[in-house]
Image (tube, rainbow, N blue to C red):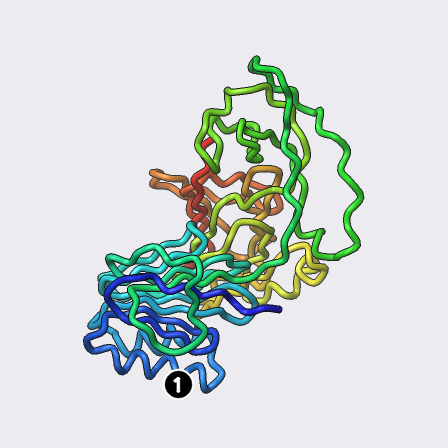
Amino acid sequence: MNGPVVQPLPGAGLVVRAGRLFAACEAAGSGELLALVARVAADGGDGEDLTRHAAGLLPGGELSCAVGGPVAGGGVAVFVCGLGVAEVDDWVRLTGPEPMRRVVAGRVGTMRLALPGAGTPHPLARLDAGVVAAAGLTVHYPETPQAPAPASHEPFQSVLLLPGHAPAPQPPPAEPAAATQPLVEGVDCKNGHFNDPAVRYCQQCGIAMLQVTHVTRLGPRPPLGVLLLDNGMTLRADADYVVGREPDRDPDVAAGRARPLRIADSHGGISRRHLRIRLSGWTVQVLDLGSANGTFVQEPGAQEAPPVPAGQPVTVRPGSKVIFGRRWLRYESHRNP
């Protein structure tokens, strides 16, 4: 597989690439950070190792910088402080001035590390290794291309929604990876973007959905947002997750129908298989798996967090907090049905 394409962003500062690890920082006082990136890369460390060491090197945010790199199992780790900015796929953004570190799990397309004043990269500019003068860099990670879903081209101009008229799905490709992209019934906006039939505005381009006749069709479900864990870890809401101390024991995890989210628990409040975050159609649900201490959902603005009945899925609205033991995660999404 080809490596990432790295483009420096013009401006004042320094950027460094050492293998898979990257940093953008102000030039003054950057020597230790640049040496750290090279040392961690030489030792075979990943983005999580680099960001952890960077946080230890700059506990008070003494240098404006943004640091990042890939982590084992997929995703990237990023660290920022001062005036540094880190962006991952336009849905995770970290800024200073206080030091902040986060692991973004799952497939990542683009990581951007920048300082104030970072310009637009030249289309032919590349950074293969070393240190150059620039105000940041953009890392484009390769991914397996997928055929776009066919857009609806209905000629009518009236407003009409016809549920249940989705064409039969095509036989799945031979590749096992196709099973990770469930098909859901949705509609296309005027520009051909696939959406939840309940939304009033396209979730990609923002155009009002009351533009053309909408005939539902089956298509691959886009991510429904992110799950933000209390320790700063961010996971894309594009698959089911089993949450607990030992989620790998769940049969759906073993069969590849859900991902494990292992939670450290020093207080004894979290079960081995505590709860499941389940995607159903266009909604996110939480299902308590018979945990000993229960699962609770606190909706946005609410003071109370009622318990989730064991074995009964409860729909989670964007902004809601799911509480289990002394830990929690929050579902965030720009979707507004």
| 216 with respect to 317 (left or right) | right
Find residue 231 and report its image quarter.
bottom left
| 72 with respect to 36 (left or right) | right
Tell me where residue 33 appears, x and y as whole percent. 30, 78
Tell me where residue 152 appears, x and y as whole percent. 64, 28
| 313 with respect to 182 (left or right) | left
- Tell me the residue at 65%/33% (across/down): 185
Crowd tier of the residue under label 1, counting other residues whose Cα lies within 10 Å: few below 14, some 14–19, many 20 or above? some
Residue 238 visible? The answer is yes
Relative to 200, residue 83 above or below: below
Relative to 221, residue 187 above or below: above
Disc 1 residue type (three-letter): Arg
User: In the image as oriented, which residue stretches furthest toward the top?
Assistant: 158
Residue picked out by circle 1 = 39
| 246 with respect to 63 (left or right) | right
Relative depth, front residue between 215 and 157:
157
Residue 230 visible? The answer is no
Quadrant where the image shows the N terminus: bottom right
- Tell me the residue at 32%/66% (across/down): 66
Relative to 137, residue 222 above or below: above
Relative depth, front residue between 21 and 201:
21
Find residue 143 and report its image quarter.
bottom right
Find residue 175 and report its image quarter.
bottom right
User: In the image as oriented, which residue stretches furthest toward the front?
Assistant: 124
Tell me where residue 23 appears, x and y as whole percent. 35, 71
Q: Secondary structure at mark 1?
A: helix
- Tell me the residue at 51%/20% (across/down): 211
Tell me where residue 161 appears, x and y as whole percent. 61, 19
